[in-house]
Amino acid sequence: MNTAHWRVQELQHHSADIAWLNAEDARRAYEIAGLHDSRTHLGLNVNTVDSIERLASGEDAAIASKWLRARVLGNQQLIVVFGEDECFLCSSVFLVENWSDIFVPSRDDAMVYSKDTPLILFYCHENEFEVGQRIIFD
């Protein structure tokens, strides 16, 4: 990841808790996220993700945080994917506590998946979440 990239700069204050992926790892993360991204709507792909739950929280960050805490359990290693070359690794505890600071300023969609479990999460720029279980998990 280019350290001059605007997203790296935007999240610089979290640099102790996130690790940007190198180009090869970011491309692979983007491919994995793409397998689970719907082609028909903003959200998860019903053909590759099971048990999808949705939350449209609007501007209520407290409700979204509570909802995430109940679904992103334990301390997992997560990959956050904004784009083909904008991906980082963080803990699930960090993401649940800081999601609004990570996602809201840029108002971009993002896909998040666990390296440890089949968990996958989609964040829509409208403060909407979808969470499910990847059917194909390696």
Image: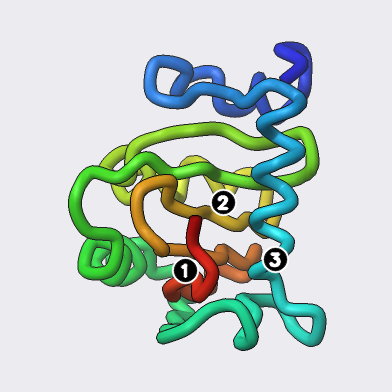
Residue wearing tag 3: 35
Residue wearing tag 2: 104
Kind of residue sitting beneath label 2: Val
Residue wearing tag 1: 59
Residue 40 in the image: x percent, y percent? 80, 86
Query: Residue at horizontal 43%, vertical 44%?
Result: 78
Q: On screen, 47 above or below 13? A: below
Kind of residue sitting beneath label 1: Glu
Residue 39 in the image: x percent, y percent? 80, 79
Horizontal relation, residue 63 to residue 41: left or right: left
Judging depth in this view, the residue of 113 and 124 nearest the camera is 113
Q: On screen, 114 above or below 63? A: above
Q: Secondary structure at mark 2?
A: loop
Q: What is the C-alpha distance between the residues marked 2 and 3?
A: 24 Å
Which circle's residue, 1 or 3, is located before the other in the chain? 3
Which circle's residue, 2 or 1, is located before the other in the chain? 1
